[in-house]
Amino acid sequence: MINVVLLGVVYILMGMGFAFILNLLGIFNLAHGAIFMSASYGCYLLVVRLGLPGFVAFPLTVLVAAAFGVVVERFLFRPMKADFNRTMMVCIALSTVLVTTFNRFLGTKVLAIPPFIEGTTGIGPYKVQTDRILAFCIGVVILVAIILFVDRSRWGAQMQAVTQNREGAALQGVRFSRVAAIACAVGFGLAAIAGVFMGSLYNLTPFMGDITLIKVLMLVILAGVGSFNGIFYVGGLLGVLYGALPVVLNGAVVDAAASIMVLALLVIRPQGFFGHE
Amino acid sequence: MSKKRFALGLLVLVLVLGMVSLLAACGSDEETTTTAGQATTTTAGQTTTTAAQDTTTVAGPPETLKIGAILSLTDWYSVVDAADKVDLEYVAKMINDDGGIKVQGKSYMIELVIEDGKSSLDGNSAAATKLVLDDKLQFVIGPGAFFNLATTPIFEQNKVLHVANYNGLNPAEMNKDTPYAFLGLDPITQQSAALKALKQYYPDVKNIVMATEDATYPAFEAGFKDLVTRTGLTLAGDPVLFATNAEDYNPVASKIKALNPDAVWMPIGIPPSFYGIVKGLRTLGYEGPIAFPVDAPTTVAALGDSATGLVGILSKSLDDPNLAAPMKRLIEMGDPKRQIFGLAPNALYLLKYAIEAADSLDPTEVAKKWETLTSIPTLYGDGFPSGNALFGLTNHAWANPIPVCLINNGQIEYKPWILPDVTP
Amino acid sequence: MFAEIQNISVYYNKSMAVKDVTVNVPEAGVVSIIGANGAGKSTILKSLLGLVPIRGGDIVFDGESISGLETAARVKKGIALVPEGRQLFPYLPVVTNLKLGATLRRDKAGIAESLEYVFQLFPRLKERLKQNAGTLSGGEQQMLAIGRGLMAAPRLLCLDEPSVGLAPIVVEQVGEVIKDINKRGISVLLVEQNAHLALGVCQTGYVLEVGQVVFSGDAEAIRCSEIVRKAYLGG
């Protein structure tokens, strides 16, 4: 049960990050999975190679990823001026470079980030690993923080304004470049958080990003472009789907079955569940 | 304007850097080919200049023999093959250091030509075509797994002797009409060792669950089920199949646990799947033994607390007192902590022996001679043929002793190697 | 002059939108630009805010050239535009729309004061504070757009076709609002097809045809001019 919930949280974190960049910059960030994977490896290197404690390595990884987001926005996304073909190429290139780099230097072994906390905790009759509970709590806190950020903060309002009407926002004095940089920082940061969770709870491989990216694309489209609430509900749904389907189905059939369900849902509601248009 | 140009310049720089790192990654095979070549020419040069006057048993400077190899160095299967490539090169060096392959009084230094099979059938078929038609090679190592489906027809049509690292038991990969196809390791014997070890160290185990990768399962189904019966075990429920690209293996684990078996046996998969399932099972409180192919140190590092009650096969470590001499030498050639799959390198080791036994560089001659051999030294000790009836070929598929270890509470205990049962 | 648009030309790709246009707005004055659809009226306002680049000419505000500044900097200097089609944020509540108008302001007391003034002008908005902007009626949306513009505490408020799609009685209200705003010392630059509204509130006016000023003068002079009477005031 906690697995389903955790997977849901990972999907939601990834989906939110992806949606931030998509909504604000109009960029389908295909490198999102690679960022997720890189952060996971980055945290692994900090913990295992440099011997940093988890509570230092985790925020450090996220901060580095966020800073990287700002750099990517400034030097890769901005010069492309949101041209669909060009940004697509940039994202694919970025993704390939990251995946190849990690595959080349660390890829031959399957790695895992050591758990931040050892041991198990009893919840009623069930025993659950403490690090999972911790991850779940951190995930929920971060999600709540993000919601508050989007809904309550000045920057959040500006981001929504840009999403809903870019020229209208410019006329209020919203500086697009600054909002875009923040969106990329938050987006990459969220991907990093999801990556570290994944790396500490499951295993690391250089291709983990590709697998998750596909689910995130599903999630964002199903939630409806432009909707943050939708990502919550659909992220949870996908978590349940991928958590529960393998119990009744075998192997790769799971992916096919989940895809068919997504497809069916899209036929019923082409605009996604919570999309604006 | 200047700002824009600066940004553009930076972008170009980043792209170039990206390309370079890509090339470094993809092109490293070519790199190693050349270094191997250089190594041979320099040693040749030295022998001619410094030892030219000495009377040598081998006449003339050594020549080179180009041997192809197909490994998937990119994409999902690179988890196995990128590591295997390192050891393949070491074994080539090992053979060269010992004077190369000796045929009719001449020494031939091995020069490997490695192609990337890209973890796909298309990629493997392109690689095979290049090795056969462009490079005109007559001996090829690889590929591994079910990728032989794509390459076998190309090799057979051109009468190229090919030694698969390991295959998917699909009849199209190897059958009575493929006289040039050889197999370094019969995958069923490897699993025979896992089950024998399970029975030996956990005598109470009767009922087991087979959990394996779904794509290759249909080909292995009959062989594996037969193996379970031959070993004197029974299957608890239907096999549990999983996809190698899943993120979360906990559902698979809970499905296994629901069958309540005495032990779990995972014959085919890749390390991420194995580790995910073991973690899941231990988290759920399942305490029975779990048998699967491992690299013991990596497994312990990746699994942490969950690394207990494991029966591991195929782990190669200097800590293992039962290590066969050639394998020990191979491990010592590089970082002893690296993960060694030892598939392609073993195939090369077998090929070298067969070429020398035939005393010929003609693949047809070598294949004929190979069919008469009943024992070949391998990296793992003395190898023996297996699966003659299964493949419809005599002495084409080979087996060897299998390393076994037990892992409990994060501690690795190496056990005597197990001689697997011969596959009919 | 307070705001001077001096001989500017604007091209979209290669087609000319506005050519050699000069418009001056005096301090605390109301100036209107009237002209038919596609005459280039909106383009002038967009170039004033830096949304489209000008080719030739200059824009001077409060004695300084602002042609090189980005939009946000111009807003900060005190120019606000209530754009054509309102450009509200439809999925944000009224209150957030208004607050976004004050994006560049930091003086809390001043912002509260502006908000108070907006509510005084448009009591309806106060009733619908939590409602999403997209759910308002056309007239309410126009009020919100103007209110949002006022939240920037502008010294020059530009209005682009505020009367479009509104009932005559609402158009009349808009006229009253403009007068009220002007009374508080804010200059207004009004772009309108509805010449009755425009000439009813302005002191000076410009008539634009195919991207060029064809007539300018004080409101009375324009009202009497032959061209305007025929084209815009129904003979």
Image: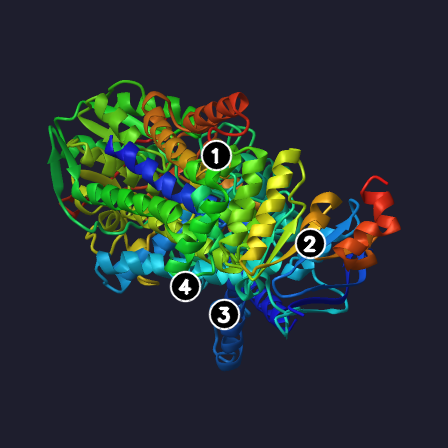
- Which residue corresponds to mark 3? B39
Asked if residue A78 lies left or right of residue C32, the reply is left
Residue tagged 1: A218
Q: CA distance from mark 2 to mark 1?
A: 55 Å
Q: CA distance from mark 2 to mark 4?
A: 101 Å
Give the percent coordinates (x, y) of residue B155.
59, 40
Secondary structure at badge 2 equals: loop
Q: Which label sits in the foreground, 4 or 3?
A: 3
x%, y% of residue A134? 21, 45
Say if B186 sits above or below B96 in the image.
above
- Looking at the rendered image, the disc whose residue lies closer to the viewer, 2 or 1, is 2
Q: Quadrant of the C terminus of chain C?
A: top right
Using the rendered view, name the quadrant where residue B223 is placed: top left
- Pointers 1 and 3 in contact (C-beta within 8 Å): no
Q: Which residue is mark 4?
A: B98
Callout 3: SS: helix
Task: Indicate which label's residue lies in the foreground, 1 or 4.
Answer: 1
Q: Quarter-wise, where is residue C156 in the image?
A: bottom right
Residue occupied by mark 2: C202
Label ID, residue B347: none
Spot the residue most to the top: B237
On the image, the x and y values in percent for residue B40 come to 51, 68
Residue B92 visible to the viewer: no
Q: Residue at x 24, y 35 (%)?
A: B280
Query: Is residue B301 rendered to the left or right of residue A274?
Result: left
- Residue B256: name its quadrant: top left
Label 1 or label 3, whichever lies nearer to me, is 1
Mark 4 and mark 3: Cα distance apart in space: 14 Å
